[in-house]
Image: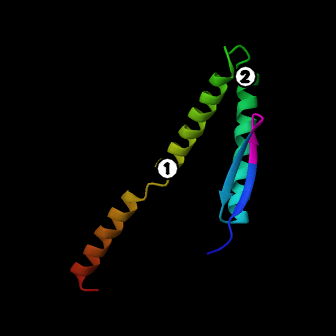
Amino acid sequence: MANKLNVKVVIEGIELPLTVPTAEEEKMYRDAAASIQRRIQRLRDTYPDMPNDKYYYVMAMLNTAFEAEKVSARANTEPYTEMMHDIEKEIESLGI
């Protein structure tokens, strides 16, 4: 079994220890942490009068989850799978 990497990322001054299997995933986690930090800062700049930091964190989570849902919806391959199945049936019916 390959050695795992112990890394720490920091978001909002909170150090998060992680164990990741590859250097590629380490970079992805670091990039994700930086993206979250930038998102929180943009929310602070856009909505400076929130009652406390929790609002920025929850808004950042909501925005991130929303983007993930959009990507997931675009990645839905079910219509193409059904189309391929129909094409295969037609090819079979033609004896090809």
Kind of residue indicated by mark 1: Ser
- Few, some or many residues within 10 Å of mark 1 (<14, 14–19, 20+): few
The residue drawn where x is 35% and y is 69% is: 84
Query: Foreground residue, 94 or 35?
Result: 35
Residue 82: image location, x then y, percent:
32, 63
Residue for badge 1:
72
The residue drawn where x is 73% and y is 64% is: 23
Residue for badge 2:
46
Residue numbers of the magenta segment: 9-14
For the C terminus, the image quarter is bottom left
Question: Secondary structure of the magenta portion, mostly?
Answer: strand
The residue drawn where x is 74% and y is 17% is: 48
For the N terminus, the image quarter is bottom right
Q: Earlier in the sequence, mark 1 or mark 2?
A: 2
Residue 54: image location, x then y, percent:
64, 24
Distance, label 1 to label 2, CA atoms, is 27 Å
In the figure, 89 relative to 74: above or below? below
